[in-house]
Amino acid sequence: MNKKFTIVRLLCAFAIAVALSVCIIFAISEDPLTAIYNLFLGPFQSKRHFFDVFASSVPLIFTGLALGLVFKSGNFSMIADACLYTGGVVTAALAIKTAMPAGLHPILIMLIAAAVGGLIGSIPALLKVYFHTNELVTSLMLNYVFFYFGIYTVTKYLADREAGTFASLKYQPTAALGALIPGTKFHVGYLVAILAVVLLYFLVFKTKFGYEIRISGSNPQFAKYSGINTSKVIILTQVIAGAVAGLGGAVEQMGMYQRFNWQDSPSYAWDGVIIAILSGNNPKTVPLAAFFLAYVRVGADLMSRRSDVQNELVSIIQAVLILFITAERFMAGWKQRQEAKKALEGEV
């Protein structure tokens, strides 16, 4: 019943978000049918646009996995933003300053970026365990620290002085993740993201440590009394989550860019919160949630270029989804009626 209820509830939230978006488009647009067509069907108009959805979902998968793992353990650290951004900076440094064979170069970069991300991810966890600080506050503050440290590093050591804007020197060709389908942005990094999904699913649901994560997140007091080292769980979980986010930064840079130009924080961690909520903190459904969000964003971008409706409409869709999915009383009455009906049928 719980699984059925979750699916029905999610579909209803999607339907409400879509209906509200259509109503807004009709209210503000002089050509609402064109806007609606491009929003919902625009990505299907060409191969390039459709596979742009997959490419756009890659960083969403990594941050969704990272935030979902943190939430699964009962914590709320947003350090994934700093991990992903710093992973991108590390990628830029290694892609510019080191020379290696094409096959080895990306692998080494991803491993180092993941290690740096894991190190950064451990900081809020260590502060929480040993100094009882709030991990949400410390992670949000540290995001700014690492963002500006990254800007300084790129400006001081990696910047292209001849470029007309903030940008690093170009990456070496050996550091690139090739396209899976020619003529599109769909790159090898998507396969790395799916591998991360499989490994995290195995970790969370098929290992002893995964059981400790789930118990610590659902009932911390029971976890302590049953002998689980909750401090270890908090630290290791956020280390792994940080490593996943750092890996995501490396994959995004090598798959989508030829030089580092993130002058503003991409804020993928906040997108990761949305993905984690939509997926129910389950790694195996993260790619579906990421695909949905990426699809809506690509459609909204096409809509803004081909009609008089701006792509900020996506923010409304996201807000409505989060509002209804996180509202505990949304469709609770329907669930109670279904459970009561099932109980009566069982008595008969």
Image (tube, helix red, strand yellow):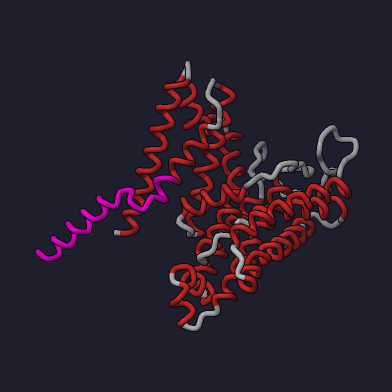
Magenta stretch: includes residue 335: yes
Residue furthest to the left in view is 348
Q: Residue at x 13, y 61 (%)?
A: 344
- In the image, which residues are magenta? 323-348
Say which quarter of the image contains residue 209.
bottom right
Magenta stretch: includes residue 305: no
| Position of 302 relative to 188 (above/below) | above
Left or right of residue 340, residue 293 in this image: right
Q: Could you tell me residue 134's position as x and y percent?
A: 59, 63
Depth check, front residue: 180 or 204: 204
Left or right of residue 313, residue 152 in this image: right
Q: Residue at x 65, y 52 (%)?
A: 81
In this view of the protein, can residue 195 be seen by the observer? no
Q: Residue at x 75, y 41 (%)?
A: 263
Left or right of residue 249, residue 337 in this image: left
In this view of the protein, can residue 15 be seen by the observer? yes
Q: Residue at x 61, y 62 (%)?
A: 241
Q: Could you tell me residue 235's position as x and y percent?
A: 62, 71
Q: Could you tell me residue 129's position as x and y percent?
A: 61, 72
Residue furthest to the top in view is 30
Circle count: 0
Left or right of residue 23, residue 133 in this image: right
Q: Could you tell me residue 264's position as x and y percent?
A: 71, 42
Quarter of the figure with the C terminus: bottom left
| Position of 278 relative to 231 (above/below) | above
Quarter of the figure with the N terminus: bottom left
Q: Main secondary structure of the magenta part?
A: helix
